Structure formats: C-alpha cells, structure tokens
Image (spheres, rainbow, N blue to C red):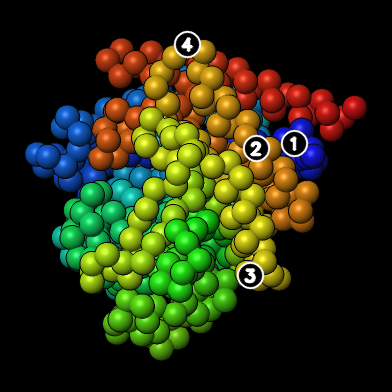
Amino acid sequence: MPNRLDLPAGFRWGVSTAAYQIEGAVTEDGRGPSVWDVFAARPGTVRDGHTGAVACDHYHRYPEDIALMKGLGLDGYRFSIAWPRVQPTGAGPVNPPGLAFYDRLVDALLEAGITPLPTLFHWDLPQALEDAGGWLNRDTAYRFAEYAAVVADRLGDRIPAWITLNEPFVHMVYGYALGIHAPGRTLMMDALPAAHHQLLAHGLAAAALRERGLEVMIANNLTPVWPASSSDADLAAAEAYDALHNRLFTDPVLLGRYPDLAAYGVGPDLGGCVHDGDLKLIAATPLDGLGVNYYNPTRIAAPTDPGLPFTFVDIPDVPHTAFGWPVVPDGLRELLTGLRDHYGAALPPITITENGCSTTETSEDQPRIDYLSAHLDALAEAVAQGVDVRGYFTWSLMDNFEWAEGYHQRFGLVHVDFETQKRTPKASYAWYRDLIAAHRAYLSR
C-alpha cells in the first residue's frame, strides 16, 4: 500500500499562514484598517475579545520565522499579502512601506532556499471597500484586479506562481451569510453576490497575472459530501450541499458555468448579479494549479426546516480535533479522486494548500503527528490512483489568531507564547522535518 514516502520526485513540501492571523502591526507603516480589525473590535464577535492587532508579531519577527521554516527543510511557504497594507483604502496610491515589507519577506525566503507562494486575498478586505458594499459590490472585483497588478509588478520577478483567493466559499458563508466572520453580515442566500464577485475578481486578477507571465491558482476549502442515508431525500440534500460548497466555486473556473442551484430557488444568474460575459471571463485564464484545503468530510441529511435544502448531521464513530472537527484521513483520498473523476481533463495539477488540526497541547504532540501522518498516507494513495498532486502545505507553521476563536485553537507546528512571542517547536515540527528529509533520501536511494 502506498505511503507518504512514495510521493513523486519534485513533490513540494511547505507550510501555510495568513496575514491577519500572524502579522500584527495593524496600524504601523501606513497600513489601513481591514474588515477584521473592525469586526474583532466589536464586543462579542471574537472569543474573549481577542484581536489580530499583535498576533504573532510576524511583521517584526519574520526573520526568526523564516529560520524556523529553513530548519524544516521546506520547499515552499504559502502566505498571504494584506491588501490594506499595500493599498490602505483598497484603491488608489500604493503604500510604499507596506509593499516594502513583502519585498523584504520574499528576498529573505529566497535567500533561505524557500519558494514563496503568495495568496492575494485571505479575508482581510480593506474596510473602505466594505463600507462601499464589500464583495456585494461588483466594483470590488475591479479594485482587486488593480491591486493584483500592483503587487505582481513589484514581486513577480521573483515569484512564479500566485494564488488569487483563499476559500471564497468560507468567506461568503461565514462573512456574508452567517455573520460568524468579518464583515459580520447575516444575509443567508442573499450573500450569493459575494460568491460571484469573488470569482469575477479571480478572473480579472488571473488575466493580469498571466499578462505578466505568471502562473495562476485559486485555493478553496473542499469537502466530500456524505448523504446520511440512501433515501431520496438525503441524496437530494447531499447533492444540493455539494453544489453550494464545492461546485459553486470550482465549476465556474474549470467549466465556465455555475452548478444547478435550483434547490436554493436561484437560477443561473444567481439572482441577477451575473452579467453577460462574466463566466467566460472567470474561466478565460486556465488555472496552472488548483489549491485544495481539506479538513473533513460533511454529512448531510434532508432539511428539518424550510430555510435551507439540507441539514448537517454528525459523522459517527470517528475521533475529533480540539476544534470539534471529525478526523477522516481517507476523506482526502476520496476528495481528490472525486475531483479527478468529476472534472477529468479540465482538472489542473493539485496542491494541498491547507491541511492540519487543532489539538489540546501536550509535550508529545502525538495527535497532530498522527493526523498529519494519516492524511499524507491518504494523499499518497490518491497519487497512486492517478491524481496529479504536486505539493502539500500543512496548516500551519505556528499557532496564530484563529479568527472567531481568537487564540484558543492551536494549529501550529511551532508553539507561540502570545504574551512573550517566544516560539518553541513542537514534536510535530521535528516529525515533519524528519519526514521531509526521509522523503528526499528515499528518492535518492
């Protein structure tokens, strides 16, 4: 049976982070406010009133963090660029000190032998754009393309591949439909324009990146969807949820069309926000890679109330992370082979851009090691079954600000004392370092 050492030559090992979760320095060097600065300042939005104002202080401590990455022997580092650090209001003049920070970061990564893989948007929209409607406003997509061009012009000479958006599904649902994340809107299905405008932003930015000779990716949270039973009602509910979670953000970029959302009472124009030519534009720049963020499958039953065409139900008899998420490593293999079967030749090479777990901290760190080990074996099985996977970036390098959970969920290979900012590698850090070295030795034997 294939295992993680059987992953192919050229496979890239990395870690992932996001700007608002680690950088801090939210008022320094001309950075403008983001939706997360404003959201986290509202009482009751984030557990215990935590904010990302300091986070891991990566803005000042990035050399130390790059040294930790180098110690792992990484091939790549996936990070995000804070739009309000580059353009404080999301449009207009560039903030030179903000862009200079990413200049320094990229140069230091390259000096350490680590390839940067930047994400242009990981949920920290400039607040000025949110005040003008945010992702409900079509104009935000055009501002995003301008921002992408600015950053690519500055950094593209050193960075070959770029990710436009991170998890547009989660941002739409948690930020605009349910209000759990910034900007905190509770629009339910009226949040669908935030889906389309993010995808339009991807299409526009992808064109700008490709014009500059750069490779283009998008990263989304994807999940195998399991019907609770074989009943027609549960099967229909699972199909409806799959269309919303997985296909809404993948079909347009790969197939140039939206999935059937009739179960939500919505037609192919998503309630009128889709203009003529939009879908052609979204799919016009072929992806060089698809980023897949995987954490768990989702089990779905027929609806119990008329609000949505599905109901979430627990997955029985599986362990759970400290966050309460079910641990199903083989779900990663199922997801990857399912993508191959569904999209066929339209599917570009895949990179696992996030996979990891929050655990209760112990000196042994065994739950995280077991989690990563099992998921990498499942990944190797998918590769053995013919799925083209080019890399694995675990979430995350270090403990950080976990959105609405504040500092209560620890996903890192490195422990961070948020009072002192001391970094301490965990046992999983050593395990991952040794795995990367063992894989290289295995290939060179």
Q: Is residue 176 visible?
A: yes
Identify the amino acid type marked 2: Leu
Marks 1 and 2 in Cβ contact (< 8 Å): yes
Q: Which residue is mark 4?
A: 363
Q: Which residue is mark 2?
A: 376
Label placed on residue 343: 3
Assign the C terminus to one quadrant of the image. Answer: top right
Q: Is residue 42 left or right of residue 280?
A: left
**Residue at x 61%, y 38% (from the top left corner):** 375
Q: Is residue 378 left or right of residue 85?
A: right
**Earlier residue among tags 4 and 1:** 1
Q: Nearer the viewer, residue 421 or 337?
A: 337
Q: Is residue 216 left or right of residue 89?
A: right
Identify the amino acid type marked 3: Tyr
Q: Quadrant of residue 99?
A: top left
Q: Nearer the viewer, residue 33 or 195?
A: 195
Identify the amino acid type marked 4: Ser
Label 1 crowding class (10 Å Cα cut-off): few <14, some 14-19, many 20+? Answer: some
Label 3 crowding class (10 Å Cα cut-off): few <14, some 14-19, many 20+? Answer: some
Label placed on residue 3: 1
| Residue 318 x/y as whole percent | 49, 38
Examine the rendered structure and indicate whether residue 294 appears above or below residue 70.
Answer: below
| Residue 341 x/y as whole percent | 67, 66
